[in-house]
Amino acid sequence: MTDNSLAIRKFSDLANPTRFLALAARLLPWLVGATALFFAAGLYLAFTTEGDYQQGETVRIMYIHVPAAWLSMMCYTIMALSALGTLVWRHPLADLSAKAAAPIGAAFTLMALITGSLWGKPMWGTWWVWDARLTSVFVLFLMYLGLIALNRAIDDPGKAAKVCAILILIGFVNIPIIKFSVEWWNTLHQPASVVRLDGPTIDPEFLRPLLVMAIAYTLLFFTLHIAAMRNEIWRRRVMALRRQAARSIGREA
Amino acid sequence: MSGHFAYVAASYAAAAMLILALIGWVFMDGRGRQKELKALEDAGIRRRSQAGRPS
């Protein structure tokens, strides 16, 4: 029996790019709306809650710095899962997912570095130190750039996917290093105060806007990721159609 | 407002610029690819799975 319907009933149905496009078209307007709502609420909270008794106004940088840093690691984790999807299950969308996520991850990492630097100057007295946390995040940024460059340097998408997937998995070792760098080494950067085994040690006054902004950033990430994956499917269709057109001209001649 | 307001403003401006650039890039990339697909379709080139279907 052949099933030609475009309905998605199980996870493996997503392997069909046409089904994915239909799902993306249905999901994206909702995701865009939810992202805008959460950003509006997050920004409102970020500027209406009190400043810190020691840090003053600069505590507001936390609401854009911490979610960006979380997202930079989540994005790489999603790329690592996609890399497994490419190498182990040969899922046709896994490679699109990894390729589409890389520039988004690079942007979030750069955002964490810039806002961190702008927070470091007034609070630490320096824009930058080569401590374990800052250096490992900088290495993550370089890895994103390297993966983008490598993917674009190889013309054959199948080959590029395999090579990049291997490199993504090797680079994943950096993620636990980033997370635990503040515990393993003496760093100027403070240790975790939200995601820790004994619960958050941060005051609810600051935790609320932080969590709303974190949801907003996560929604933004998935909106952009799905849209970028859709762009990639279109790009490959254009390539395939051009090749098909060139072949048919060759036959006619 | 304390004297550190410039750092807060610069952080939010940098984050906003990066996010807007990212959204703009994804949006323009999508529009460009859709235009290319439309041009190919107008030229009568279609995916094999849709070759037999009326437009």
Image (tube, coloured by chain):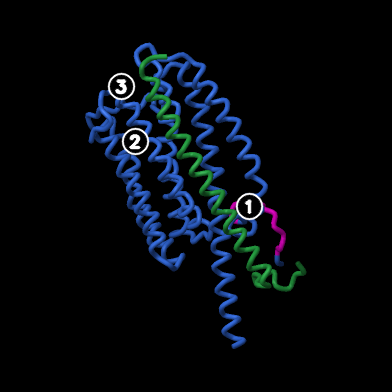
Chain colours: A blue, B green
Q: Nearer the viewer, mark 1 or mark 2?
A: 2
Magenta segment: A3-12
Mark 2 → mark 3, Cα distance in angstroms: 22 Å
Determine the secondary structure under disc 3: helix
Q: CA distance from mark 1 to mark 3?
A: 50 Å
Residue at 38% across, 31% down: A115
Q: Nearer the viewer, mark 1 or mark 3?
A: 3
Chain identity of mark 3? A
- Farthest residue to the right: give it: B54
Q: Quadrant of the N terminus of chain A?
A: bottom right
Please tell me the numbered disc located at residue A179.
2
Residue A29 position within the rendered picture, expressed as x and y whole percent measured from the top left:
65, 42
Query: Where is residue A30, by image quadrant?
Result: top right
Tell me which label, 2 or 3, sits earlier in the chain.
3
Mark 1 belongs to which amino acid? Answer: Lys
Q: Which residue in the structure is indicated by mark 1?
A: A10
Type of amino acid at the residue the image marks with label 2: Lys
Chain for disc number 2: A
Task: Measure how far apart labels 1 and 2 are at the Cα level.
Answer: 34 Å
Q: Which of the two residues, A100 or A6, is positioned nearer the viewer here?
A: A100
Residue A62, disc:
none
Residue at image coords 54%, 43%: A222
Q: Looking at the image, tell me whether mark 1 or mark 3 is earlier in sequence order.
A: 1
| Quadrant of the rendered image containing residue A192 | top left
Question: How many other residues sit within 10 Å of disc 1, few (<14), some (14-19) or many (≥20)?
Answer: few
Which is more foreground, mark 2 or mark 3?
3
Question: Whole-percent x and y of residue A126?
Answer: 25, 27
Which of the two residues, B10 or A177, is positioned nearer the viewer here? B10
